[in-house]
Image (cartoon, rainbow, N blue to C red):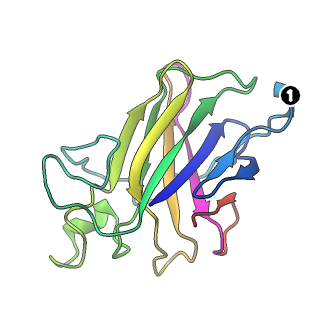
Amino acid sequence: MEHLACDLTRRRFLQTAASLTASYFTVPGLFAEELMRTPEMTAGPLYPDKLPLDTDNDLIIVSDSITPAVGQITHLSGRILDARGEPIRDALIEIWQVDNTATYLKERSYRNVGTFDPNFQGFGRFLTGSTGEYYFRTIKPVPYPTRSAPHIHFMIKVKGRSTWSTQLYIQGHTATCVMVSID
């Protein structure tokens, strides 16, 4: 079982410590001015054009199914912070990624049946609480042909602010963004 935690700030992912099964990201030091901006990246062409009926934060189980998705289970959690390091409440966090066959939800409409995992939700949402926390249960992303680095897409929506997107890369694969380790 995988655990993955990170603080998403509008400044930058910063890695400071790791535990037995998780990589934890925190801001270094005690002062908010030390925060660095998280790189903004495009949402990409594979953001779902039609959202699934089930958009909760558990991507392993679709609706009331008893069959889980195939893949290495990963727990993704962290906090959304503003530029001063203050938590952002009621931020809508959306994630999307490929399943264990390297297929995005959007690609299912034109791929052959059986070439994707119908038990993987592919997309999830979570509304942050008073401490800016979020949590998702998903699978460890896998590489796919047009990208060498497995990753999870993030989109953050906060009322009164511009929508913001980035990607979380997995350590050990070539990428140009912040990488995290999943053991």
Against 101, residue 183 (above or below) is above
Which corner quadrant of the image does residue 28 belong to? top right
- The residue type indicated by label 1 comes to Glu
- In the image, 151 versus 79, the foreground residue is 79
131 relative to 139 in the view: left or right: right
Q: Secondary structure at mark 1?
A: helix
Q: Which residues are magenta?
A: 160-173
Percent across and percent down for residue 10 are: 68, 35
Percent across and percent down for residue 127 are: 42, 29
Quarter of the figure with the N terminus = bottom left
Percent across and percent down for residue 136 are: 42, 45
Q: Does residue 158 show up magenta in the picture?
A: no
Against 160, residue 97 (above or below) is below
Q: Is residue 173 visible?
A: yes
Residue to which mark 1 is pinned: 33
Q: Is residue 44 visible?
A: no
Percent across and percent down for residue 31 are: 86, 26
Quarter of the figure with the C terminus = bottom right
What is the residue that sits farthest to the front in this orientation?
20
